[in-house]
Image (cartoon, rainbow, N blue to C red):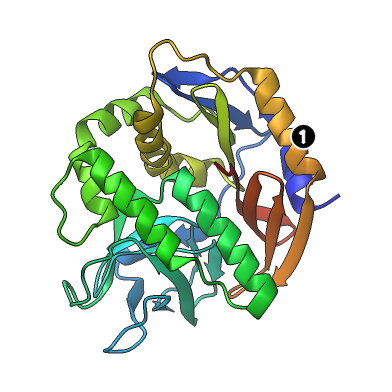
Amino acid sequence: MHEIERTIDELVLHAPQVHRNLALHPLVGAEDRPRDYLLLEEALERGLARVDEVSVGGSVHEVALENLSEWRILLVDGDVLAGARKNRTINLSILVAPGAKLTVPVACVEQGRWSYRTRGFAASGDMLYPRARAEKIRSVSDSMRATGRRHADQRALWEDVAQKVHFSRVDSPSMSLNDAYRAVDGDLADFVAAFRPEPRQRGAVIAIDERIAGVELFDSPDTYARVLPRLVRAYAIDALESERTAAPSASADDARRFLDRIKTAKVERFKAIGEGEDLRIGGGDLAGGALGCDERVIHGAVLALA
């Protein structure tokens, strides 16, 4: 039994929370497990971490992180960093040891800018939406198998982000994902307000219309609660694009079948960039990754490919 299967078996599926065509089926644990790390946005806000370009010239595929704290710091797959030469999304979840300096693999979510907006990066409060994130996860897994690197298909991501910018009907000279989010902030705020974490909730099976879009798993209810608003925004911007009148919702049975598929999927193991192991899940129309450390899944995401 691998860590992801064990994590799913620890959790109970509850009745979904629904807003419009987005449904979150809570995954609830038996205990309120505390977390023993900072999230990157907390560390940046408190001056306990620094994220910069790897050099003055920069690299589209990498940024440099320094943990200035005595805590471990968790970077969550798909989170978007804003500033420096281009806004980037983090390619996989990473746990950074106290005092460590790491080169973090990223992908660009802003095509038309290559000039400094700020010297370093800040947390944007956004996350890559699941349609593009699923393809990014798959391409990162392919890169790990082929070269040992954790690179995404940058051209495909730029094309997908450009489609999202056009959908949002925003004037974005640099074709920035963050501009697309800002253009629909009002709708996204309504989605965020509709979803609340349950006690001891550590994840969710997430459906858009009648289709399961993905599963998000965390080791701590507090981590899930803090990440939930940007998770909802990310899934909701895809939901806005696909919304249809009177679309059927995915059922609890659909959610259980999706979880069963994850439990039986092939898992590949790689040494993590930071602490722990990178677990990669693939096969058929699934693309997933998880960070395993201390005999638990710190964060895992398995998404449905379009």
Query: Is residue 180 shown left or right of residue 245?
Result: left
Quadrant of the rendered image containing residue 228: top left
Outermost right residue: 1
Query: Residue at the spot x=29%, y=70% of the render?
Result: 47
Query: Is residue 254 shown left or right of residue 196?
Result: right
Note whether 49 is above or below 260 in the view shown.
below
Residue 185, how many percent across, how many down?
A: 22, 37
Instruction: Report how many numbered discs are placed on residues in the image.
Output: 1
Query: Is residue 120 shown left or right of residue 154?
Result: left
Outermost bottom residue: 56
For label 1, the crowd category at 10 Å Cα-Cα, with few meaning under 14, some 14 to 19 and many 20 or more, is: some
Residue indicated by mark 1: 260
Query: Residue at the spot x=59%, y=17% of the render?
Result: 15
Note whether 271 is above or below 241 in the view shown.
below
Q: Nearer the viewer, residue 167 or 282?
A: 167
Query: Is residue 84 shown left or right of residue 260?
Result: left
Q: Is residue 96 visible?
A: yes
Note whether 36 is above or below 240 in the view shown.
below
Q: Is residue 181 visible?
A: no
Residue 95, how many percent across, how many down?
A: 55, 67
Outermost top residue: 246
Query: Residue at the spot x=31%, y=45% of the render?
Result: 164
Q: Amino acid at mark 1?
A: Asp
Q: Nearer the viewer, residue 125 or 96?
A: 125
Residue 34, how many percent across, how many down?
A: 57, 48
Residue 113, how many percent across, how many down?
A: 21, 70
Q: Tag 1's secondary structure?
A: helix
Query: Residue at the spot x=64%, y=66% of the render?
Result: 142
